Amino acid sequence: MKKSQKGTIIDSLAEAIDNSNNFYLADISDLNAADTFKLRKACFDKQITLRVVKNSLLRKAFEKSNKSVDEIYPLLKENTSIMFCNTANAPAKMIEEFRKTSDKPVLKAAYVQESIYVGDDQLKTLSSIKSKEELLGDIIGLLQSPIKNVISSLQSGQNKLTGIVKALSERAE
């Protein structure tokens, strides 16, 4: 590979790293062609960009990017693939689902919303992180709950008030 090609790859990786708030590093070595195809398809379906990269080029891209990921450098050994996504927990959930039928991919590290998670044991934690949409749904549900209680109280009070007025009007006659 020529130096200009390497420079282009490093630049595109650094740009992708800078533009992404979430990326995962995983080891997908030892997957056969059929499993690799299934993994790539699962990534595509979940809107995850999967790239297999050389560790030296990835390290240079990290150094060129604006993100501080020094903790990840020791993990750049053997085969490494990087997954970019907009939803913080999508790759973790996809890896968990894929690992029901295979031992790979193995999570090396993840950079999620300016936090670094190192090791495959962090997979459960990462998959339980709620996405922005899920958090907004929870907040809206919490905000609607008191309003629903007030409305139901007013509606039940309306029925009681109607009954009292009717009873008083019948008694007056």
Image (cartoon, rainbow, N blue to C red):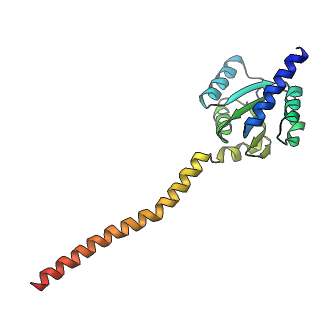
In this orientation, does residue 25 appear? no
Where does the image place residue 82, in percent across and percent down from the top left? 76, 30
Please state, as top left, top right, bottom left or bottom right, where the N terminus lies in the image.
top right
Where does the image place residue 78, in percent across and percent down from the top left? 86, 27
In this orientation, does residue 155 appear? yes
- In the picture, measured across the screen, residue 66 lies left or right of residue 172, that is right
Where does the image place residue 36, in percent across and percent down from the top left? 70, 22
- Residue 108 lies in quadrant: top right
Residue situated in front as seen by the camera: 125 or 160: 160
Residue 107 position (above or below residue 3): below
Where does the image place residue 103, in percent across and percent down from the top left? 72, 31
Residue situated in front as seen by the camera: 108 or 163: 163
What residue occupies the far top of the structure in this picture? 2
Residue 78 position (above or below residue 164): above
Which residue is at 75% across, 45% downward? 122
Please state, as top left, top right, bottom left or bottom right, where the C terminus lies in the image.
bottom left
Residue situated in front as seen by the camera: 128 or 67: 67
Which residue is at 63% across, 26% downward? 44
- Residue 101 lies in quadrant: top right
- In the picture, measured across the screen, residue 1 lies left or right of residue 169, that is right
Residue situated in front as seen by the camera: 39 or 114: 114
What residue occupies the far bottom of the structure in this picture? 172
- Residue 56 lies in quadrant: top right
Which residue is at 73% across, 37% downward? 20
Which residue is at 37% across, 69% downward? 153
Total of numbered circles in the picture?
0
